[in-house]
Amino acid sequence: MPVTLLGAAEIRALAADLDVTPTKKLGQNFVVDANTVRKIVHAARVTSADRVVEVGPGLGSLTLAILETGAPVTAVEIDHRLAERLPATAAAHGVPDGALTVVAQDALRVSELPGEPDVLVANLPYNVSVPVLLHFMEHFPSIQRGVVMVQAEVGERLAAPPGSKVYGAPSVKAAWYGPWRLAGTVSRQVFWPVPNVDSVLVGFERDTDPRGTEEERLRTFAIVDAAFQQRRKMLRQALSGVLGGSSASATEVLERAGVAPTARGEDLTIEDYVRIARA
Ligand code: SAM
């Protein structure tokens, strides 16, 4: 039996049956358009050979589109009412036994995932999308690539190159793991309820070789945070607290790393930050 997708009327009926009123707090804007969920799965190039993890499956619209490819899905959902209903929705839509595993947990706290997923596909809860992405990249090295839907400003920031206005700490931290790119826009009209922000798709690939050890990552991220906390200041000032306690000690480390002490945080690539952490 082929997997069938959820329609707009069925999504509302499911929510009514569960007595779920979508909440802003949990970023609950459900996609009610089959073309959009298929577009996301297509952008992520999911095939039956993949093992997918989805964050925030909600009522299951994107989940079913992923399962339609034949790839098994592990879905992490914080709202227990939604998590409990998902297996029945999947079964009623032709999903074979064993293809879907639901983890009823906060994605920010999940520390183990069954099935060693290699692809992340999600319509992320917008208020926690960056922390969820960084948590998953850090804790689940089996994830090799992914496509996620996020608020447009967040997507632009994740994919921003150095020097751009929106380049910030999330851009550099995300780049630790590999390259990120914008992968398409999504109309507000495909959601219920319609959100008051625009959405984009963002794709990423994990680099084959890790950039450094866990200790180096932590040190690099602390330097990135310090650099962007005072993004208008020159690095010798902004980093004085984390590089020896004075602007003179920071200058010395920056020069050793081959980075101009008069540069600003927004000018540096992830490679520059890693060199500072090592210096
Ligand atoms: N994937 C569904 C869709 O496209 O219709 C729902 C997407 S909705 C934008 C975000 C989903 O994430 C909601 O189902 C919400 O309950 C869930 N969620 C919110 N915060 C979460 C968290 N910290 N961990 C896991 N799920 C979360």
Image (cartoon, rainbow, N blue to C red):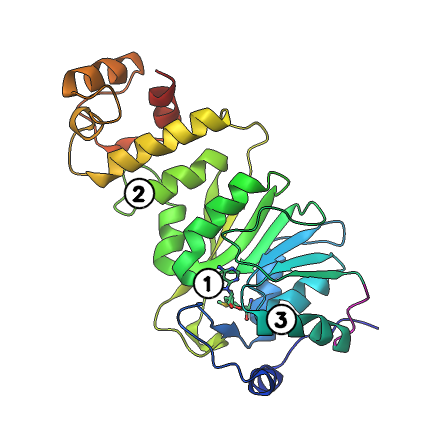
In the image, what residue occupies the spot 49% across and 52% down? 108
From the image, tell me which residue sits under label 2: 168
Residue 14 drawn above or below residue 244: below
Residue at disc 2, secondary structure: loop
From the image, tell me which residue sits under label 1: 125
In the image, what residue occupies the spot 55% across and 53% down? 147
Badge 3 or badge 1: first in the primary sequence: 3
Q: Please, what is the three-letter code of the amino acid marked with disc 2?
A: Gly
The magenta segment: 93-97
Badge 3 or badge 2: first in the primary sequence: 3
On screen, residue 239 versus residue 154, left or right, reads left
Q: Is mark 1 within 8 Å of ligand 1?
A: yes
Nearest to viewer (mark 3 / mark 2): 3
Q: Please, what is the three-letter code of the amino acid marked with disc 3?
A: Gly
Per the model, the C-alpha gap separating discs 3 and 1 is 14 Å
In this rendered view, identify the residue nearer to me: 41 or 63.
Answer: 63
Residue 242 drawn in magenta: no
Residue 57 drawn above or below residue 128: below
Q: Is mark 3 within 8 Å of ligand 1?
A: yes
Q: Which mark is residue 60?
A: 3
Nearest to viewer (mark 1 / mark 2): 1
